């Protein structure tokens, strides 16, 4: 590892120092809050027509004292979106087009040669820290292992490398031995409330059994870091029992309450295998500690990224203290967090838990602002106090299937390039923001935040990023400093594509009523497939093979949908073009590669800022023939977007062998390849999981300046 780090630092960290900009505005600190899987449908700020949405008084107050961006596109999945936030580059440039899972190879993770935000701001004198979910790269199939965050410039990182909370543990830390799932929330329940049990705590050093308290609410026990005692059949144990406590597996992960922590600090990685603190509470506390520490830091400015891992499934009830007073489980709803004996349908439960989670996140944001002096209470009103700090809150992608709120479409949600999958909330306040309380309806993209970070640090990212790494970001600061700033973007873009994997991804089929949805690109392991209620089909190679098998057996569904391997969307603000790389079995049924929408005439446009939901019946290409389907105005818009999309895609042409992304294949790329020799890496040019002679031959064959 030291050899790799030395080689890495020699050609990845260096960057030009931005020129003195003379009378530049004062630099600002940055608090960047990422809400995992919180799409535009979840907040009243971005979904004014929604009913029963989460209560988010803190986020609403930030918008009321800042700017609400009502037309923000992100990517359909979390890893691509997060890489966009910190590189300013579309997924086809970074190679990260889909969420990272265990078998994802290094070339589908963020490259160590990207000029990420902490590198840009570090050169400008900023102290940067990221606390919470990372998911830009990971330890699996990465030569840097647990130092993956440091390899991307995040040398001050603390929390989880997992892409989601661990699976919930229905065995209650190994105590329940029955195969029947009695407690899908990871703690025992009785009726519609947590059960009352004895609460055991981990043993200290040299102890075999830790402290135990009798008669404790099971959720309160879990929140405090304990485990409720139950018998092997799941029956709650009310009084402390040493034999029962001895059966507890203290290393068992359990959703957001017990999870593995990874720390990167000054080039050293460490790990705690079982943290017993609710993840969102822990992430907020780490942000508070970091921000307060900067008051005594020799560096004068800072950027704190608070990347919450909640609202990603699996959901559990958050700590009671994080919820509005009086919040209780509805008596008419079975107490469950997933598939559980006696519970037929958990969709209502999951939607409720998502609501609670977002409300809990809102309270954690308020705690951070109050605990750091960035906010205060004036009577019962929350007020920001951030003249030198810009606060940014954004969702990373659309909401997940079961949590989607009307009028958005749950069947076209996260993992799709439709509106429900890529429209996200974005609010910004503090620092140089003028005319607070306004909305900006101009098009904004996830990549634009990268330029905002530079603007706030007086860094021109377009000159600070080494030549060869094309940026896609556009200015954002004018929207904050000038209330009537014109639109910067003339088009917006989003995309998804399948990753390079070490192991094959077999079809996963998820059945909902008469609709069967198949994916052979996203749910890349059997456990991931089954966690979403799907059935893993390793006997066939892809979704088309599965459909053929079902058809031959007479079990084909009325509606068979596929999450496409490649999706692209582009819009000029009104018209939207969607490209999907259709599998051959759907093309035989007359499906089109392209869909075309007039968002101003789509479902619910009148209540969604003039841009409705692109449901199938609003697709203007009914016969796939623009000459037949579209009138003159529509054809002009369609042709224009087709041409723009072609230009965007053509700009993605890459150089095979340009490992260091400097626009040429030379000794730097050779040195990088040799540093990674024998293992998986971004220099694995043929995507077979190992960097070796075959890759070297490809590099040498491409030697020289990139053709484009």
Image (tube, grey):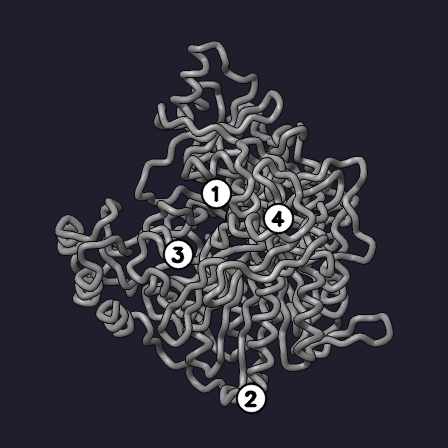
Residue 676 position, x and y percent, is: 22, 60
Q: Is residue 363 left or right of residue 325?
A: left
Q: Between residues 336 and 695, which one lies in front from this camera angle? A: 336
Q: Between residues 606 and 565, which one lies in front from this camera angle? A: 565
Gap between marks 2 and 3 measured at Cα: 32 Å
Q: Between residues 594 and 322, which one lies in front from this camera angle? A: 322
Q: Are there few (<14), some (14-19), or many (20+) residues within 10 Å of tag 2?
A: few
Q: Name the residue under label 1.
A: 568
Question: Which numbered tag is attached to residue 698?
Answer: none
Q: Give the mark toward the camera: 2 or 4.
A: 4
* Disc on the earlier residue, 2 or 1: 2
Q: Mark 3 points at which residue?
A: 138
Gap between marks 1 and 4 measured at Cα: 51 Å
Q: Give the mark toward the camera: 1 or 4.
A: 4
Gap between marks 3 and 1 measured at Cα: 25 Å
Q: Are there few (<14), some (14-19), or many (20+) residues within 10 Å of tag 4?
A: many
Q: In which quarter of the image is residue 12?
A: bottom left
Q: Which residue is drawn at 49% across and 34% down?
A: 530
Residue at the far right: name it.
379
């Amino acid at each position: 590892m030291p050899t790799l780090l030395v080689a890495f630092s020699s050609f990845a960290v260096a960057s030009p120092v931005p020129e003195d900009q003379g009378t530049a505005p004062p630099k600002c600190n940055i608090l960047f809050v990422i809400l995992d899987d919180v799409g535009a449908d979840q907040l009243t700020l971005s979904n004014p027509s929604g009913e029963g949405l989460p209560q988010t008084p803190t986020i609403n107050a930030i918008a009321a004292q800042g700017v609400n961006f009502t037309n923000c596109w992100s990517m359909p999945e979390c890893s691509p979106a997060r890489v966009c936030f910190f590189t300013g580059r579309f997924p086809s440039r970074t190679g990260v087009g889909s969420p990272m899972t265990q078998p994802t190879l290094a070339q589908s993770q963020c490259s160590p040669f990207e000029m990420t935000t902490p590198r840009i701001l570090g050169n400008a004198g900023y102290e940067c820290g990221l606390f919470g979910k990372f998911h830009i790269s990971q330890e699996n199939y990465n030569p840097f292992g647990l130092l993956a965050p440091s390899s991307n410039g995040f040398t001050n990182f603390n929390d989880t490398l997992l892409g989601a909370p661990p699976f919930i543990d229905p065995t209650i830390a190994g105590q329940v031995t029955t195969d029947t799932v009695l407690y899908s929330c990871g703690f025992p329940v009785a009726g519609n409330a947590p059960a009352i049990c004895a609460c055991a705590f981990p043993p200290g050093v040299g102890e075999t059994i830790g402290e135990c308290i009798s008669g404790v609410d099971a959720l309160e026990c879990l929140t405090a870091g304990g485990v409720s005692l139950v018998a092997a059949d799941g029956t709650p144990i009310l009084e402390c029992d040493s034999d029962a406590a001895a059966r507890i597996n203290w290393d068992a992960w359990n959703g957001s309450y017990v999870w593995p922590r990874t720390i990167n600090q000054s080039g050293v990685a460490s790990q705690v295998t079982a943290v017993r603190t609710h993840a969102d509470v822990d992430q907020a506390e780490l942000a508070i500690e970091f921000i307060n520490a900067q008051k005594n830091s020799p560096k004068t400015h800072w950027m704190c990224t608070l990347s919450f891992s909640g609202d990603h499934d699996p959901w559990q009830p958050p700590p009671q203290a994080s919820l509005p007073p009086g919040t209780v489980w509805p008596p008419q709803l079975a107490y469950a967090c997933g598939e559980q004996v006696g519970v037929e349908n958990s969709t209502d439960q999951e939607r409720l838990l998502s609501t609670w989670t977002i409300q809990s996140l809102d309270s954690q944001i308020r705690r951070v602002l109050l605990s750091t002096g960035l906010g205060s209470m004036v009577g019962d009103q929350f007020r920001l106090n951030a003249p030198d700090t810009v606060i940014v809150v954004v969702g990373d992608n659309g909401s997940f299937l079961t949590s989607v709120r009307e009028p958005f479409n749950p069947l076209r949600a996260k993992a799709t390039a439709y509106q429900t999958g890529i429209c996200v909330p974005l609010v910004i306040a503090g620092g140089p923001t003028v005319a607070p309380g306004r909305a900006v309806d101009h098009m904004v993209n996830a990549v634009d935040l990268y330029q905002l970070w530079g603007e706030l640090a007086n860094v021109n990212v377009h000159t600070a990023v080494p030549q060869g790494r094309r940026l896609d970001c556009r200015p954002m600061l004018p929207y904050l400093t000038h209330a009537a700033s014109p639109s910067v973007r003339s088009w917006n873009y989003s995309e998804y594509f399948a990753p390079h994997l070490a192991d094959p991804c077999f079809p996963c089929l998820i059945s909902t009523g008469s609709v069967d949805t198949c994916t052979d690109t996203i749910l890349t392991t059997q456990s991931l497939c089954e966690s979403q209620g799907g059935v893993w089909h390793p006997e066939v190679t892809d979704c088309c093979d599965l459909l053929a098998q079902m058809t031959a057996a007479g079990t084909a569904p009325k509606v068979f949908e596929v999450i496409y391997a490649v999706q692209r969307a582009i819009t000029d603000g009104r018209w939207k073009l969607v490209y999907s790389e259709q599998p051959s079995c759907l093309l035989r049924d007359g499906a089109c590669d392209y869909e075309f929408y007039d968002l101003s005439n789509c479902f619910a446009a009148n209540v969604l800022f003039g841009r409705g939901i692109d449901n199938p019946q609003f697709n203007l290409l009914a016969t796939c023939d623009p000459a037949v389907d579209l009138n003159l105005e529509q054809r002009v818009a369609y042709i224009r977007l087709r041409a723009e999309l072609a230009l965007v895609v053509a700009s993605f042409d890459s150089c095979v062998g340009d490992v260091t992304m400097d626009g040429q294949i030379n000794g730097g790329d050779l040195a990088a390849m040799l540093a990674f020799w024998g293992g998986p890496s971004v220099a694995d040019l043929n995507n077979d999981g190992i960097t070796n002679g075959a890759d070297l031959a490809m590099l040498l064959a491409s030697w020289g300046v990139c053709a484009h």
